[in-house]
Image: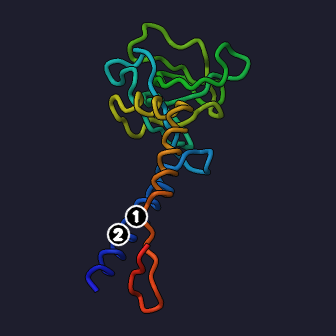
Amino acid sequence: MRRRIVNVLTLAAVLAVLAGWAIFLRPPTLGGPTTYVVVRGSSMLPLYRGGDLVLVHQAPTYRAGEVVAYRVPTGEFGAGHIVIHRIIGGEGTDGFVVRGDNNPTPDPWRPRQGDMVGSAWLHFAGLGRTVVFLHQPVIMAGLAAAITVALILAPSRKRGPSGVRLAA
């Protein structure tokens, strides 16, 4: 009986974590609100350093003072790349004026509302390096292989009709 309660509580905890991820941390490619941005360079010092991971959430509007991630507008040099900087002026229709906290001048781009990826929500110092490392194809293949081998070699827990474990 005690084991059954532990199993139910474990399942409930796993489902709660998965539900939390699905609601708050799911990326846009899966219909969620959160984009994972790895900071590169020193333009946002001292707030963010190269290798930090910043989670950004989509928002209906953005305003001066917010740290946002945006895609370099189509037709511009670097189009499509994600930049994380602070809004210092402008608005969504004609374009925002953005600048890195550690930069002396604003960015050359004027992203509009549709170019915005999201507003900074959570920050994990240094974790971006790990994310970049794990996204390497050889690492992903190695992890998939290790999981596959573990599942194949895991002992089965077959049970007979009376619920007694059978010998493998």
Q: Give the class, few, some or many, for how many residues have Cα within 10 Å of label 1's Cα (few <14, many ≥20).
A: few
Relative to 31, residue 71 above or below = above
Q: Give the class, few, some or many, for how many residues have Cα within 10 Å of label 2's Cα (few <14, many ≥20).
A: few
* Numbered tag placed on residue 10 in the rendering: 2
Farthest residue in the right direction? 75
The answer to which image quadrant residue 129 occupies is top left
Q: Kindly identify the residue that appears in the image at 41 percent across and 40 percent down.
A: 121
Residue sitting nearer the eye, 158 or 46: 158
Residue sitting nearer the eye, 69 or 133: 133
- Provide residue 75's location: percent of width, then percent of height: 73, 18
**Amino acid residing under circle 2:** Thr
Q: How is the image coloured?
A: rainbow
Relative to 35, residue 109 above or below = above
Q: Kindly identify the residue that appears in the image at 36 percent across and 24 percent down.
A: 48
Mark 1 residue element: helix
Relative to 40, residue 121 above or below = below
- Provide residue 136's location: percent of width, then percent of height: 53, 30
Residue wearing tag 1: 14
The answer to which image quadrant residue 128 occupies is top left
